[in-house]
Every structure is written in C-alpha cells, then in structure tokens.
Image (spheres, coloured by chain):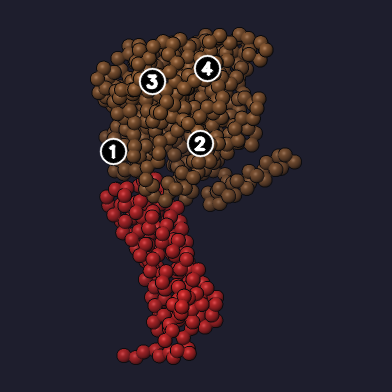
C-alpha cells in the first residue's frame, strides 16, 4: 500500500480550534447522526402512522439543523482563515454539498411543522432521503481532507 | 401621509411574518363562503402557513363597537378578566363566565413553542388577574346599568358553559360538569359543587371550552367537547370522546356521544321554532386561507360531520392516516357556512322583542376572528336570518368595529346571550367588557337620562 505522506509543515492548520483541536470535526457528527435518525423516524412514521415518530423527526431535524449551522460556521472560518485550506480541491464540493444538506434540512424542518400525515409523507420523507444520500459523499470528502491531506491535524 | 405610514407598517409586518410565504395569501372573497353552498378551493399546504393575528390595543375611553342601523350599543360591564361566555338567569341577573385556558400540556414538538408564542400576542388584553370565576351582574333599578359586579362563583377550572334547570345550576368546567344549588335571587354560591360527570380535560386540552345547554324538558344536558388537536397531530388516542357533542343524563351523569366529527362545537342552543339543537363549529386550519369554512348546523342524533377525515361532506383531508372511508361515506354536510377561520364561539337565537322585527327568530353569531389568513376575517357579530327553523338568507354584520382602521384588535367577541329585557349581550374577552346591544329607539339611554 502507498500512503500520501505530508510533513507537519505542509499540514493546513484549522483556524477555528480550541487548544489545537479543530472545532469543525467536533460538531460534524451531531447533524449527521440527527439527519440519519430523522430518516429512520420518518420511515417508521410512514409505516406506522404513529405520531410519536413524526415528533421525533421534528426534534431531530431541528437539532441537526442548529448543530449543522454551527459546524458550517466553524468550517467556513477554517476555509476563510487559511489559504492552504482553500487550496485543497475537496473543500469546495464538501462545502457546496453540505450547504445543500442544510438548505434541504431547513425546508424539511418547515415541512415537519405541518400537522399529521403530510408533515412527513411524501415531501418530508423525500427530503430526508436526499439529505442522507448527500452525507456519505460530503463525509468522504471531509475525511479526504483530514486523513489524507492532514487539514487540522497537528502532528 | 397617514395612509403612507400605514402601508409602510403593513409592508413591514408582512415582510417580517411572511418572509417565505409571501404577503398575498391568494384568498378569495370571504362572502363567497357564507351560506349552505360555500365555494371550496383546492387544498394548499405551506412551508409556513399564513399567520396574521390582530395585535391587541384595547378600547380607548369612549370607544365602542359599531352597530347596524336601528341599534345602539353600550358597555354593560368593563374591567372583567377574560369574559368568555354569558348566561341570563330567570330573574334577569346575568352571569359572566371569566375563564382562562388551562395549563398547557408538555410540549411534543418544536412547533408548539412557536405557536404558543404566536398565541400570546392575541389572546389576552394585557395581564389578566383573577379569572376562572363567574361574575354576577344585577340591574336592580332596571336602568340598563348594572350594580357593582360581584363574584358569584370562584375557583373554577377553565369554565365556559352554564345551564340552570330548576334549582340546579350546572357549570361546565373544562374537565367536568359540576352541579351547584341555586335559588332565585342568589348573588353568591358558597356550597361546594357536586360533579355530575367528568369530561375530557387534560393533560392535553387543546380545545378546552365546554359549551353547555339543557334540553327543553330539562332531563338531558348537551355539552360540546372540542378536538384535542388541529387535525389529529396529537394522536387519535387523544381524541377519545372529543370533537363531539355529548348527551348527559341529568339524573345519573351517564353520557353518550350524541353527534361526532364536530371539530370544535360551541354555542349549543335550541332553535326556537323547530326545537332542534344547533351549534357553531370551528373547522380545521393550515390548508389555505379559504379552507375550511367554519359553520353553524343543526345537530342530528347519531350524525357524523366529518372531522378529522373529511370536511363539508366528503372532501378528504390528506393529513389524516389511516383514513376511514366508512365514516366519510356517512359524513353530513353542515347547514350553513360562516366563512373560513372566522372562529365562531357564540350563538344566540333571538327570542326577545326589544330589537327590531327583522332580528326576531334569527341567530346571532359571535366570531372571535381569524389567525390563519392574511386578510382578517370575523372579529364581529353577525346575524343569520331564519325562517321555518332554517337559515334563510345572507349573514349580516350587526356588531363590528372590534378592529380599528389599522387592523388592530380593540376587542374580540366570544359568547352571546339575550338578557331578560331583550338586549343582546356580547362577551369581549380581549376588551374585557360585556357589551349590550338594544334597539336605538328603545328606553332611555343612560347617557340621555343623566
């Protein structure tokens, strides 16, 4: 196996960090888990028509959106704060893809404020599916930047 | 200049409230939805439903609602605490039911936080103190001005309906019908009440007003129990014995569902000519500014009126799953639409003789006013003429001016009653006033007498 080797000096530093720990990767799992969770509870509601699951979806989507926006702010600070982060090509599709996720989640939150069945079926469920389909792609690009290009990696 | 500022402000309100939904909600003529055959548009679902509630400004000194020609209006009592319904006792004393919504249940989803905030703009005119009580108004010398109001019955649980049968006074709290002993002329009840029957109350108690009327023979009580949601979003199990009119045996307290599918029935009254039970009903929200028209209808024994599965007969509501085609098949079309989102909460058939001839035998309806459409609808008392026990003609505005020229709420009408002298009484829960409408020519006005 061959590894892309970068030296410490070449690794782009994350601007938004706490004691050298970059903030963006700390926040990112929260929206990912929430949006996947909302897809699962949406499906469960669509199958059962039991309102409790639609309520769970509404909370998960809202929490995912809030933490997604916070993660996006930290990520944008990293992008804007360091020319060498901007020089990594995966940062752009990662940014655009996740922006699309947040826009979809925003509309999905609104759809889920409807009452009963049509708060999920069909529009909410479709938005949840599309959101979750984007996540592995943008996630892959994010991992590419951290694990292969060492963005935010100290040593 | 004035209109300029008005449009600027209107624009700002629209911009802030409706960033996404757009200012024009595309609503049609509200009058096309009055009568037995309302025009029903296609269902629309929204990212943000249109929300517009008249901001509360209250009545300035000397301001009153406007009345139709031939009528006059005066405040009968002011400074009340959220008066919601009225009842005239046989000796002419008037009971004012002052009532506040019960404590909200635990929040189930984020939307309820926002809706709770939106409602807080509209419901109360300033801070209300002691409420959940009944105040007595007595006019000892018959001059149209009551003596000092006195507390008749206190420490109730979100009361609404009142009915007197013989010496038994029934109060419909939000969670029970309670019986109290009453003698003609009593000004205060101190005896503890006796529960006739519990009613569907909390912990979720979405539509909490329990309208009450006794059958003409006094053996039965009819109580309106509103749904526990807009459209089943709290689950069907929360709707047990709700969205219905219950018939309660006065002797035993046992009840049965008299009619169902009535989302929020209020103003239960017997029509004087046909002796049929009538109600006004608040229909569902959030499927468009012109859906669904609220209505008044005669109520048939065992009938089903659609909620939640369908509206105005067989128009299916896609928000309800699983559907019940068996129930929709037998859903009855209500008698008379009152236009969408007007929120009728009061109904009184006019059996007095004080008001001009044209009002005799017809029905007054108190329309609390809309929140779910851009162009405000309701916020007034209308009159529906009746002939042979059925509505006969277009509803007419009788008492308006609850909104000022800037669409701000000076008051909002709720429950209605006819007093012993034939005046029409209106409970105004935002203006905290009881208004009295009489014939312009009748008697001496208190002001003229001074």
Residues at discs 3 and 4 in contact (Cβ within 8 Å)? no
At 64% across and 36% down in the image, what residue appears?
Answer: B406
Q: Position of residue B408 (x, y in %)?
A: 60, 36
Q: Secondary structure at mark 3?
A: loop
Q: Is residue B50 at least partly visible in the picture?
A: yes
The image quarter containing residue A108 is bottom left
Q: Which mark is residue B190?
A: 3
Q: In the drawing, does residue B397 fall left or right of residue B279? A: right
Residue where numbered disc 2 is placed: B123
* On-image quarter of the C terminus of chain B: top right
Is the Cβ of the residue at disc 2 closer than 8 Å to that at disc 3? no
Q: Nearer the viewer, mark 3 or mark 4?
A: 3
Quick one: SS at disc 1?
loop
Dot 2, how many residues are within 10 Å of its Cα: few (below 14), some (14-19), or many (20+)? Answer: some
Callout 2 and callout 3 share a chain: yes
Q: What chain is tagged by disc 4?
A: B
Q: Nearer the viewer, residue B225 or B292?
A: B225
Badge 4 or badge 1: first in the primary sequence: 1
User: Which label is found at residue B324?
Assistant: 1
SS assignment at label 2: loop
Query: Do marks 2 and 1 share a chain?
Result: yes
Indicate the chain coloured brown by its letter.
Answer: B
Q: Colour of chain A?
A: red
Crowding around mark 4 (Cα neighbors within 10 Å: few <14, some 14 to 19, many 20+) is many
Q: Which of labels 2 and 3 is toward the front?
A: 3
Asked if residue A6 is positioned above or below residue B300 in the image, the reply reads below
Query: Is circle 4 on the same chain as circle 1?
Result: yes
């Amino acid at each position: 196996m061959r590894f892309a080797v970068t030296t410490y000096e070449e690794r782009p530093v994350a601007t938004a960090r706490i004691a050298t720990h970059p903030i963006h990767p700390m926040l990112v799992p929260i929206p990912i888990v929430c949006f996947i969770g909302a897809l699962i509870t949406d499906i469960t509601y669509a199958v059962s028509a039991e309102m409790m699951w639609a309520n769970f979806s509404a909370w998960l989507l809202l929490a995912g959106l809030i933490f997604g926006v916070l993660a996006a702010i930290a990520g944008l600070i990293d992008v804007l704060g360091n020319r060498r982060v901007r020089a990594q090509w995966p940062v752009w599709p990662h940014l655009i893809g996740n922006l699309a996720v947040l826009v979809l989640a925003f509309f999905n939150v609104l759809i889920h404020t409807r009452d009963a069945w049509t708060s999920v079926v069909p529009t909410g469920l479709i938005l949840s599916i599309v959101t979750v389909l984007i996540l592995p792609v943008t996630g892959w690009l994010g991992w590419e930047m951290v694990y292969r290009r060492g963005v935010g990696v100290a040593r | 200049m004035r209109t300029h500022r008005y449009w600027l402000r209107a624009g700002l309100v629209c911009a802030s409230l409706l960033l996404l939904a757009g200012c024009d909600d595309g609503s049609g003529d509200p009058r096309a939805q009055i009568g037995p055959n309302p025009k029903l548009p296609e269902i629309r679902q929204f990212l943000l439903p249109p929300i517009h509630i008249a901001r509360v400004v209250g009545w300035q000194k000397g301001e009153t609602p406007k009345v139709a020609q031939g009528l006059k209006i005066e405040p009968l009592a002011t400074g009340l605490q959220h008066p919601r319904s009225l009842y005239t006792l046989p000796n002419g004393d008037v009971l004012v039911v002052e009532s506040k919504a019960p404590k909200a249940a635990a929040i189930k989803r984020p939307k309820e936080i926002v809706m709770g905030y939106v409602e807080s703009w509209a419901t109360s005119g300033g801070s209300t103190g002691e409420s959940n009580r009944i105040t007595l108004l007595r006019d000892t010398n018959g001059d149209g001005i009551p003596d000092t109001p006195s507390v008749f019955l206190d420490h109730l649980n979100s009361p609404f309906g009142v009915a007197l049968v013989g010496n038994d006074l029934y109060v419909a709290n939000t969670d029970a019908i309670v019986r109290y002993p009453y003698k003609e002329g009593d000004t205060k009840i101190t005896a503890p009440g006796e529960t006739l029957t519990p009613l569907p109350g909390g912990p979720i108690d979405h539509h909490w007003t329990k309208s009450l009327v006794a059958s003409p023979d006094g053996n039965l009580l009819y109580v309106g129990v509103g749904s526990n949601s807009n459209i089943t979003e709290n689950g069907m199990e929360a709707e047990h014995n709700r969205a219905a009119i219950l018939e309660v045996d006065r002797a035993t307290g046992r009840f049965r569902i008299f009619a169902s599918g009535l989302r929020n029935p209020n103003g239960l009254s017997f029509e004087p000519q046909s002796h049929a039970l009538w109600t006004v009903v608040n229909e569902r929200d959030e499927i468009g500014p012109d859906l669904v028209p609220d209505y008044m209808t005669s109520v048939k024994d065992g009938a089903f009126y659609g909620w939640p599965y369908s509206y105005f007969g067989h128009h299916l509501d896609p928000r309800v799953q699983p559907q019940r085609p068996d129930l929709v098949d037998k859903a009855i079309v209500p008698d008379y639409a009152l236009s969408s989102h007007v929120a009728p909460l009061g109904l009184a058939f006019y059996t007095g003789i004080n008001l001009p001839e044209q009002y005799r035998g017809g029905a007054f309806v108190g329309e609390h006013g809309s929140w779910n459409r851009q162009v405000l609808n309701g916020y007034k008392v209308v009159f529906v003429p009746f002939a042979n026990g059925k509505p006969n003609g277009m509803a007419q505005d009788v008492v308006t001016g609850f909104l000022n020229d800037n669409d701000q709420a000076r008051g909002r009408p709720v429950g209605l009653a006819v007093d012993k002298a034939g005046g029409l009484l209106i409970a105004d829960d935002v203006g905290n006033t009881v208004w009295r409408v009489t014939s312009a020519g009748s008697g001496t006005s208190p002001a003229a007498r001074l």
